[in-house]
Amino acid sequence: MSAAAMFAGSLPGLILMDFGQAMVVVCVCFDMVRAVSVPRSHRRYVANTIFRTLAVPSILVMGVSVLAKAIQWNWTDVAMGVFVIVMIIFRWHQDKDEDSWWKGKGKKLARWARKQLTPRPAFVPASASA
């Protein structure tokens, strides 16, 4: 745990955490754009797509950030980070009926993965079978 806290305090760790926090800010901003946009508009579609794309990585980044702050015994930042995680999860689960690029992609991605993971038929040359 102390090694993780030391990495979070180093320059590469701080750069990674800053990129992650910037991604969380972008995710929350697009959620606000989605909230104030007209339903079924292109602006709302784009904002919802970006929010749904960045929600899971933002939750993971905030989880790592909360863990790093807990290791450093910084409980105010832990409480604020947990609040942001809960808010993103709540907003992610609240509006399921919205249209986004991801709607219906689960079945398409499963079909693609199934097609990629099935073994390919082996072709035998005609001279070898005779």
Image (cartoon, grey):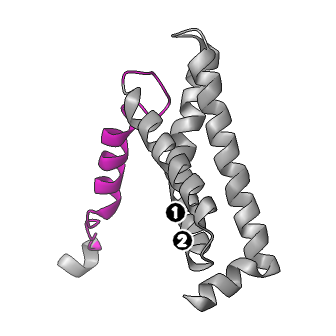
Secondary structure state at the residue bearing disc 1: helix
- Residue 120 on image: x %, y %: 29, 65
Residue 26 part of the magenta segment: no
- Image vertical order of residue 92 relative to residue 79, above or below: above
Name which quarter of the figure residue 3 lies in. bottom right
- Residue 121 on image: x %, y %: 25, 66
Secondary structure state at the residue bearing disc 2: helix
Highlighted range, magenta: 97-125
* Residue type, numbered disc 2: Leu
- Image vertical order of residue 67 relative to residue 24, above or below: below
Quarter in which the C terminus is drawn: bottom left
For this rendering, which residue is in front, 91 or 112? 91
Q: Residue at x 68, y 50 (%)?
A: 23
Which residue in the protein does label 2 denote? Answer: 67
Residue furthest left as drawn: 130
Which residue in the protein does label 1 denote? Answer: 63
